[in-house]
Every structure is written in C-alpha cells, then in structure tokens.
Amino acid sequence: MGIGGKSSPPILSQVGAINVRHMAFLKDSGYEAVPYVCAFCGNCTMVCPAFMHLRWEPFGPRGKLHATKEIIEGVINIDEEYVRRMYLCSLCDHCTQICTTSIPLLEFWLFIRKEIEMFGLTPPSISFISKSLEDYGDPFAMGPESRRIWTRGIKKIVEPRIGKQAETLFFIGCACALKPQLHGIVRSMIKIMERAGIDYSLLGENEACCGAPLLWGGKPAGAKELAEQNIIWFRKIGAKTIVFNCPTCLNAINEAYAKIYGTHAEKEFNLLTASQFIVHLIREGALEFEEQPLVTVTYHDPCVAARKLNVIDEPREIIDSIPGLYKVEVINSGKETHCCGSHGLLNVIDPLLSSKIAEERLRQMSITPASRIITECPSCIQSLELATHTMQYPIAVEHIAQLVADALRDE
Amino acid sequence: MSQTKQVTSLNESNKADQEIDPVLAQLVKVVGPDNASNDELERIVYSGDPSSLPHFHYRWKRKYLADYVVRVEKTDQIREIILIAKEHKLAIVPRGGGSSCMGSSCPSRGGISLDIKRMNKIIDINAEEGFVRVEPGVTFADLEIELAKKGMELGIYPTSAKSAVIGGWIACGGRAGIGTPRYGTLEENIIELKVVLSNGEIKIVAGKEALPYIGSFGILGVIAEAKLKIRKKPPRIKPLSYTFQRLESLCDAFTKVVGLSAKPVYLKIADARFQKYSNPLEKGRYVLTLAYNDGDDIPFDELQRIVGENGGGMLDDEYAENEWELRYDCEFKPKEYCHTLMFQEVWIHSDNVYDVLEAYERSKKTHKVPALWFGMLGTQSMVRLELMAMLNPDRYLEFISSKGILHKMVKRSIRLGGGPYTIGLQNSIYMKKAYPERYAAMKKLKNELDVEGIMNPDRVTNCLTSYSRINLLFFLASGFRRLAKYVAR
C-alpha cells in the first residue's frame, strides 16, 4: 500500500451524503467521514504499538475511530479520558501503512489533536512543550543561545561555519543541539563533512525547531511558523542541499513547505537525511574506511524515515560499504518497522508506555546476533538506549553518522 | 503485560465502580484491575465487528453492548470468569481479533465480552512431527514468523489473517481460506483442542469429538488451546490471472479448474466492479486468479486450454502478482468508496456458482442495486461467495432492497444444497434450514453442555428472530415494491 502522496479515500469528498449528527466535533473539517470509511477489520489494531502493550482495543486505531464515531453521533462526550486515549499514540503511521481502506490515519490523528486543542482539552504536559516552543523556540525551554553548547572543543572548526554562505546546510535539530547525550551525532556529521571536504554552513542560534512537536500537540499553525523561520534562513545563506540528523525534522519542514508555498520543497531545496547524504559521499568516493574488527550490526528503521520518506536502502548500503561490518536484519524492518515508542510526544504523555514499547523493540533486536544497533533518528537512539538500561541488556545504540565517522580511515 | 500509569488510573477510577458493582469486583479478583472493565468506551469498542451496518439496522439486537470487558491470560481464568457469569446469569461473548463479520463476537444480551488476545503464546513447534501448539490469541502473523524460522508454515490462513487470531478462526469454522483448497479446511488441520465448557470443565477433544467446536461460534465453550498440523514452507508461490467477458464462461472455466487434480492454494473469482477498487481490470468483465505452490506441478497447458475454450485471456504477471499481494486486503477495498458495505457470504458447491451469480447479477439490474461480488474456493469443491452492495444508509429503500436480494441469494444457495458461510448472529436464522443435521447435533450438545444458555447466546442454535418472520418481511417488501411499480405505471 502506497504511503507517500497517497490519496484520500473517495468517500472523504462525499461528506455531505452522510447522515452525521451532533457534528460539533470535527465539524466542517473534511475529516468527519473518516470513522465511517473504516471497515473495522482490525488490521491496524494488531500493529499498533500502544495496543500491543496496553492490549485494550480502545487504545488501538480501530478503537479510537470507533470512539470518535460515537462522539460524532452524540453517544459519548469528548472528555479527558477520550483525550488521553487519543494521545496514547506514537504517530508511528503503521496503521496507515496497513489500513485496508487507505485512510490517511496519521493525518487524522493530527487533526483530532488539533480539535482537542480547540476544545481546550490538550493534556498539560503537552501544553508545556508547546509553550516552551513558543517562548524559546525549542521543546526544552533552553533558548537559542544554548544551541551552541555542542560546539565545545571544536569551536575553531565550526564557529566559522555558522551563518556562512554555502550550498550545503547542516540542520542539527533541537534534540541533537541541546541534549549532551546526542552531541556525538552532531560531531560525527561534522567529522564526515570535514573529511569529505564539503563546504557547509550551520545556523547556530538562528536554527529553530522544525515544528513537529507543535504539530503533534495540535498546533499546526505554530508548527508552520517555525518551519517557515527555518526556510527563510535556508534562503538567506543560499543553501541548496539541507542535511538533517533527524528524519522527523526533514519531514516536518518538507510538509510545512508544501502547505506554505503550495509546492514541493524539492523544487527549491534538496532535503536529505543523514544516510541519504552519506551514501552520496560514499558513492562519489569521498569517504574511505578502515577495516572493522568483524562487527555485527542491525538496523532499526525509524518510522518516519521508512514509512514517510522511504529511506530504507541507503543506510543498508552504507553499512555494506564499510569493510568488516556484517549486517543482520531484525524482524519488522523497512516499512514494517516497529516504533521505538518515543515519537509523537508519547514519551511526554506516558513515559512508561513509551519505555515499554522501546523495550519490546529492543527485545526483537536482542534475538539477532548484533552487537550494535544502528539507526538514524535521535529520538529512537534515546529511547532504545534507555531500554538497554531498563532491560539491563548492554548493547550499543548509534546513529548511522557515528558508525561512519568512527570507521573513517585516519588522515 | 505492561501496567502503565494510565491503565492504573483508569482502574483507580473503576475502584468506585467495583464497590458498587459486585460483579466487576469478582471479575477483577480473577484477572486483576488492569484486565476487567465496565467503562462505556471499552464496552462500545468490544461490542462491534466489521459488520459496518448503520445503527438503525444493527441495534435491533436486544442488548448490543457488553456489560463488562474481561481480558484473560490463562485457561484457569477463562474457567473462573465462566463460573462468575454462570452465577450471575450473564452471557459470555468470546472475542478474538474481532475481524469476523455477521456479529460473531457482538453481544445480543449484554454480558461479558471475553477477550482472548492476551493468550498469545506459541507453546510448542515440532517440525519433525509436523505440529504446533498455540494459545487461541496467537495472530497468524506472529505464528508465521515463528514457523518460518524452522522452515515451516501453517499453510492455511483466513483472508482476515492480518487481524484475526487462531482461536477466532477455529470458532468461525475456518472453511474457506488461503491454502484450504490445497491443504484442507481447519477441520482437517486440527489435531486437538482444549476447550473450557460452561460448567467450568476443561476438556481436551480430538478427532470427531472436536468437530462440534470448530465453527461453534463459542456457543459450547471457549477454545483455550489448539494443536495444529504444520508443513514445510514452499519456496515461492506462483500466481496466475485470467480474464473473461461472460459470466457463464468464467463459471465454466472455474468449475473445470476446480476439477483439475493439481490444487491451488488460492482460487479467486470476481467481477470487474469488485476489481475496480483493488486491482482494476483493463479488459474483460470478470477475473479468475489462481496461486500454486511453486514446487507443485502447475497445469499450465490445461489451464490454457480451459481458458481458451471459454474465450478467456491471460493477464500479465504483474497483475497476477498484485492479485496475490492483495489477497488479505481486496475484500474490504470497496469500503473505501462507500459508507456501508453490506455483504452476505454463501457457501455452495462449485457446480452451482453460476446459478447464484447469474441470479445476483440479474437482481442487481432489476433492482438497480450497487452490487459486486467475489468468490474463493474453500475446499476442493465448495466455494465461499461474498455478495456485496455498496450503500448509503440515507437511501433506506436501496438498503432494504439490497438486504432483500441478499436474503434471496441465501435462500437460493440453500435450495442448491449450500447455505450461509459465516453464521454469527445475523445468519443464525438460516441454520436450521441450511444445515439441519448440524443444527440438530449442535442443539443437542448445547442443551447438554450449556444448560443456562450463557455461552454466546442467540447464534447457531437459537436466534433473536425467526427465518419465517424475516422471510415474510422481505416477501411483503417485495410485494409493496411490485405494487408501487404497477401504480406508478
């Protein structure tokens, strides 16, 4: 089933033909028919990470649609319980992938969150994140000046890059810029670009959040605003190619671009994930590797990279290009990947559930002979790393950029 | 099982309910606070299935909402819950993936929706002796992954395999699925079953003794474990698709293909309207798709001859591959384009397929009903035909006409020696007429094993309304329609 550019089920354009009562919720949104398109086959329930752990059907997508239908028809009311259930979702998009009737479920969940926000029922923890984004431009309330903390020790190399006119821009993202646990990813990307002789630029404190958390928190307008701030800066420095550490940032800016300008971002920019960028460098012969001491790795596909951006082959090609690395596949990989539990603010709304989902994913990987887990999403790294501690299963979790940077041949 | 803060808080809010609801308190005592609920939302979700019918239709059921939802993890818990239900004279409605139609797992008298999905352990895979022992909540996808590690497969799957669980398919009969024409129905693949009866007895049944429980829709007891045959996984599947202009040609070719000694794992027929929503036909009005195990002797020449004799043509490999890819999804694809996808499933001999389909297509024209259909071979001679109508419930007359036509088709199938496929809540009215021997045997067992009548009531041996009443209703509707037409003329 196609995901990218998938058209909505035709019934969505026939809303007028449907006898829907008590339509205050979702009124005139164009989404009010979604619960009626659902065939209630239950395919989505079986792949939903929230259902897999909570095992109550109302937490799965079918149950959520059923509840929404009951609200539309005035059988039950929108209350905190409904809101909480709608937020127990990592927006991993697996339900869209498997939906028999091609409902754009991810889009629908986001719209429901927007409606919830309009009803003033957004959970306080989510509102806190939204406020931080509005006040500080990042979800951690740290402010723009903190966006350079990762440069410690390599200031001489990177400071001249900040704000520099260049065709390649490295978009670092809030998590990588502000969380010390993830600074290694940024440094690795810097090492790779320096080694490949790329003339690149950084935005420093002018970089804003990609907007994804605001979108997940039911504030798409705010998300668009943040994305636009970034796009303006991309233009200011003359960037043509923008490289992202985090596929979610790429996807958020890509989708916001389409909404703001009514055209695809690719017409103006070449937006690349880290693995897409690195694989180009390898194909051009810009990177050379040391032989690795027979390391077995497995690749965890981040939901957004695999299902939204279709970036599946590139990281595997990179792994295959490094001598001495041996790759094993985990079950549920590629478009069938399982969520790490931290996406869609699930880690904010229910850290324990998020952690259980990560543990399950780690369990799947623990039955492979891999001694290292590679991925390309900072959120996945954080949640899987946490799972290695909670499960007491010591295995390294690395970003693809870290794997590449560590394997580079010494100059 | 995860115990999140949220579920705990949900059940904290249920603490008050437990104090005023002694039944809930008893259920909680057996399965714990995380696994029993009387929350309205829970009850609503656990009371539905893919029968996407509008409220005015399906809410005729006496008490369509479960009173409690309970999730069990062990056989003993099923037993305890059944005993509580018995004590309070509450119905037990076993529920697997909730993917069967016809209200199979929908309550009709409230009661307890007994969710078996937590019983999802694969207990034993024995590749040498060719069997697997599983709990009833194991999904086909999980079982497939585990069996594939040993180069084995179950070989038979329902078309709802993405969401169905094994116990649910057993309870629904498992007669027509992917692989059943080649390896036999579930009945032929079940070695033994562990069932919990309504008196709390836990029984292991095998051979003939197991037969009543297969397709019992939970009216005799709850399936707690199954031992099933497994076989070597074939390296590849080879799908082939053919197109036909005329229904008669399609059905003739179909009957002849069914008669060949080489049995496919999948044999589907459909009209162009059905195909339009999943794998559209560029030429022809009907399609026939077969899939064989690549290791089997595929009768290419005979297929070509049969198709040629009937004026059919072969479709390209890409089309056939798509058909195979869509085997789990094609059934619900038309739902994407309509509010209500009404359907009826009939179970008939392959020789009678033309008779039913011709009548259905005729009714489609005379009553101007947006009808479509597909069929798949179940056993080596019996076929499951799914007759559908894409409806808008606002058009009440169209809805009733379609319902009436589908009723006529079931009657026709019964006359031809067949009957409805899935029985569930909605088709129990046909049980006595279509399968009198099975009905009598099940009735006898039901009376012996479930004296209080608490196990999934109102299906198979009993129903909320009667065949005569429904028949009279449609007879009158048809009479008024004719009269209205006459007056209008």
Image (cartoon, coloured by chain):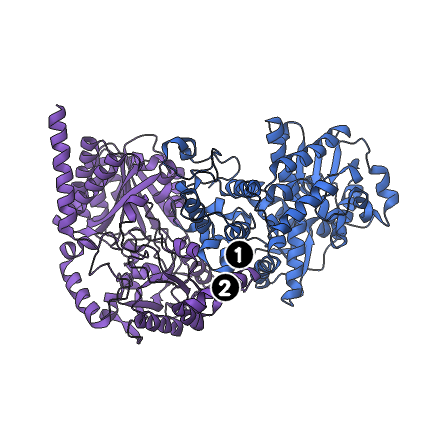
Chain colours: A blue, B purple
Residue at x-position 30% and y-position 37% = B391
Query: Against B50, is B14 above or below?
Result: below
Looking at the picture, tell me which residue is in the foreground, B267 or A48.
Answer: A48
Amino acid carrying mark 2 in the image: Asn
Label 2 environment density (alpha carbons within 10 Å; few <14, some 14–19, many ≥20)? many
In the picture, measured across the screen, residue B433 lies left or right of residue B346, that is: left
Whether residue A57 is visible, yes or no, is yes
Q: Position of residue A47 (x, y in %)?
A: 48, 53
Query: Against B53, is B280 above or below?
Result: above
* Kind of element beneath mark 1: loop
Residue wearing tag 1: A331
Mark 1 against mark 2, which lies toward the viewer? Answer: 2
* Kind of element beneath mark 2: helix
Q: Quadrant of residue B279?
A: top left
Q: Position of residue A108 (x, y in %)?
A: 50, 41
Q: Quadrant of the C terminus of chain B?
A: top left
Looking at the picture, tell me which residue is in the foreground, B304 or A14.
Answer: A14
Name the chain letter of the residue that bears numbered label 1: A
Name the chain letter of the residue that bears numbered label 2: B
Q: Measure the C-alpha gap from mark 1 to mark 2.
A: 34 Å
Q: Quadrant of residue A292?
A: bottom right
Query: Against B20, is A33 above or below?
Result: above
In the picture, measured across the screen, residue A238 lies left or right of residue B451, that is: right
Whether residue B125 is visible, yes or no, is no
Q: Which mark is residue B403?
A: none
Amino acid carrying mark 1 in the image: Ile
Residue wearing tag 2: B11
Residue at x-position 22% and y-position 69% = B208
Q: Quadrant of residue A166?
A: top right
